Image (cartoon, rainbow, N blue to C red):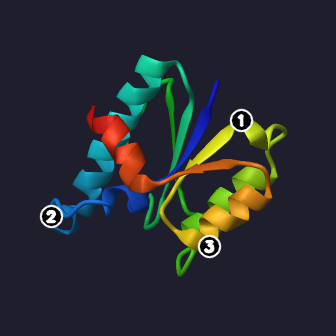
Amino acid sequence: MTRWVVDGMNVIGSRPTGWWRDRPGAMRDLASELESFGAATGESVTVVFDGRPFEIESGESLDVRFASRRGRNAADDDIAALVEGDGDPGSLAVVTSDAELARRVRDLGASVVGSGEFRRRLDA
């Protein structure tokens, strides 16, 4: 079973939907899609967002997190730390199109799925 760790803003930004006009709304929408994905597949999903934390509803299939600090690569660093601290990083699939984050988590034993490819899975 795959456990997913999603670079939230990377997936949101993978298509030009006008998300930048309502960033919190786009984050809530993605969380809802990820919850449905996790419930349908039976796989756990963790999403990490950049920005100031706010309430996002999630169910049993989704763990919503916000970067522990602000600034460049904040969510990326948290995602890499999640992978590094995991007892079974080989069961993790990190969703990102950030080449440096992809390299970091692969070096730690996780697999990587591109944001566009994952977006297509959510849309299917």
Q: Nearer the viewer, residue 103 or 53?
A: 103
SS for tag 2? Answer: loop
Amino acid identity at mark 3: Glu
Q: How many marks?
A: 3
Residue density around tag 1, few if under 14, some if 14–19, many if 20 or more, within 10 Å: some
Rendered-image quadrant of the N terminus:
top right
> Residue 59's spot in the image, x, y percent?
44, 26
Amino acid identity at mark 1: Ser
Whether residue 54 appears in this view of the structure is no
Q: Residue at x 54, y 81 (%)?
A: 72
Q: Is residue 68 left or right of residue 85?
A: left
Q: Is residue 24 left or right of residue 81?
A: left
Q: Nearer the viewer, residue 39 or 103?
A: 103
Residue located beneath label 3 in the image: 100
SS for tag 1? Answer: helix
Q: CA distance from mark 2 to mark 3?
A: 26 Å
Q: Earlier in the sequence, mark 2 or mark 3?
A: 2
Residue density around tag 3, few if under 14, some if 14–19, many if 20 or more, within 10 Å: few
Residue located beneath label 1 in the image: 91
> Residue 51's spot in the image, x, y percent?
43, 67
Rendered-image quadrant of the C terminus:
top left
Residue 18 is marked as: 2
Whether residue 92 appears in this view of the structure is yes
Q: Residue at x 68, y 66 (%)?
A: 103
> Residue 12's spot in the image, x, y percent?
32, 57
